[in-house]
Amino acid sequence: MNARVIDGHNDVLSHLRDEDAPDNALLHEDAATITVPRARAGGLAAGFFAVLPIAPAWEIRRTPGGYEIPIAPEVSWEESARIVGALGARLFRLLEACEGQVRLVRDVSDLDACLAGEALGAIFHFEGAEPIDTDLDALEVWYAAGLRSVGLVWSRSNAFAHGVPFKFPSSPDTGPGLTDAGFRLVRRCAELGIAVDLSHLNEAGFWDVARTLDGPLIASHSGVHALCTYSRNLTDDQLDAIGSSGGLVGINFDVGSLRADGGDDAETPVAKIAEHARYVADRIGPDHVALGSDFDGATMPAELPDASRYPRVLAALEAAGFEGGEVDRIASGNWRRVLAAAWG
């Protein structure tokens, strides 16, 4: 398969937060799972480059038949703004040092240029809205800087919403919905043309966004709850709402989101990604399926060590019965359509 890929999530910027990494690290093949050489080899045209405050060390509690990771404590706006500001600056240094080989994607014309092979596209994404004040003044500044996607939470509460704890088995129905500030944030993102991402958001928050947002619902890197009863995965009712809105699900490559036993086993076959994609397509249609790897942020199948291996995912989709045009839409066409709608 030679389809061009748009990937809904990666944590490369957090991986490269070390000041010892050179500013042109994305030109060095082995610097991260997604670099310019690896993107070229794998057909990656653009990806959502996430920034988030430092996550706490994992404290995994084993439970009968599964596990639970206690929800992370909230991070203050001041601390978040400091950390994410530094990561944002890191992104812009990387862009400058890559001399045109990596492009900040601000609109669909930028995205199309990347799909045409002009550069690797970086879609600037907040994984958690903590760096935004509740008056939303900072949102205007970040938008001017190129922010085009906001995940309301990263599996912890903040001033806007409540995330799901990392828990297996578990429903995503784990707490209250959006705060008043959260409703204001969703509406202002829609006005500005910033995509709102529902991954990591609990079920009550999901339905609050669904009732508020007049546009496609996006879960950038999630799996199917019916196949893996993980708190982060989407129920059938949530899938139906995403389909009805014209939105999409970026299928997560994280093995713990894919396996029926919730295991963190890198020997998980790539076919599991296609299994989740097939389920979503059979329920709401192939136009609502996309890719959202979580490279550099989770355990990938051993067959997918880095971005050069996207063709293995596309081959698995073909093996699962997706035809050429459908594979192309899952690889990039569905993301392009939804982002065009969200960005206006």
Image (spheres, helix red, strand yellow):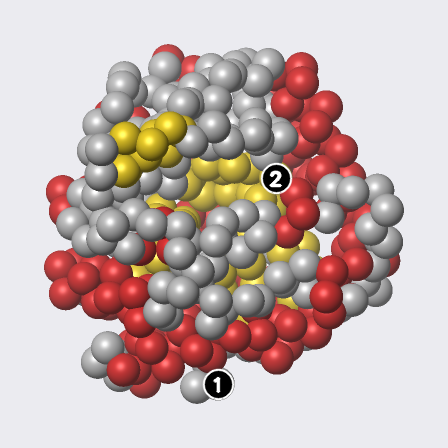
Q: What element carries label 2?
A: strand
Residue 147 at x, y percent in the picture = 60, 41
How many marks can you see? 2
**Amino acid type of the residue tagged 2 in the rendering:** Val
Name the residue located 72 percent from the left edge and 23 percent from the top edge. 82
Mark 2 and 1 residues: CB-CB less than 8 Å, in contact?
no
Q: From the image, which quarter does the N terminus lie in?
A: bottom left
Above or below, 113 relative to 212: below
Residue 74 at x, y percent in the picture = 51, 16
The residue nearer to you, when weighing 256 against 59, is 59
First reached walking from the N terminus: tag 2 or tag 1: 1
Name the residue located 54 percent from the left edge and 48 percent from the top edge. 297
Task: Give the side of residue 207 with respect to residue 155, left or right.
Answer: left
Query: Image quadrant of residue 231?
Result: top left
Query: Image quadrant of residue 97?
Result: bottom right
Count neighbours of disc 1 (C-alpha within 10 A) and say few if under 14, some if 14 to 19, many if 20 or more.
few
The residue nearer to you, when weighing 187 against 91, is 91
Count neighbours of disc 2 (C-alpha within 10 A) and say few if under 14, some if 14 to 19, many if 20 or more.
many
Q: Residue 226 carries which label?
A: none
Name the residue located 40 percent from the left edge and 23 percent from the top edge. 70
**Amino acid type of the residue tagged 1 in the rendering:** Asn
Residue 272 at x, y percent in the picture = 30, 65
Q: Residue 51 carries which label?
A: 2
Q: Which mark is residue 2?
A: 1
Q: What is the spatial separation of the Cα atoms under label 2 and label 1, in whole angstroms?
A: 29 Å
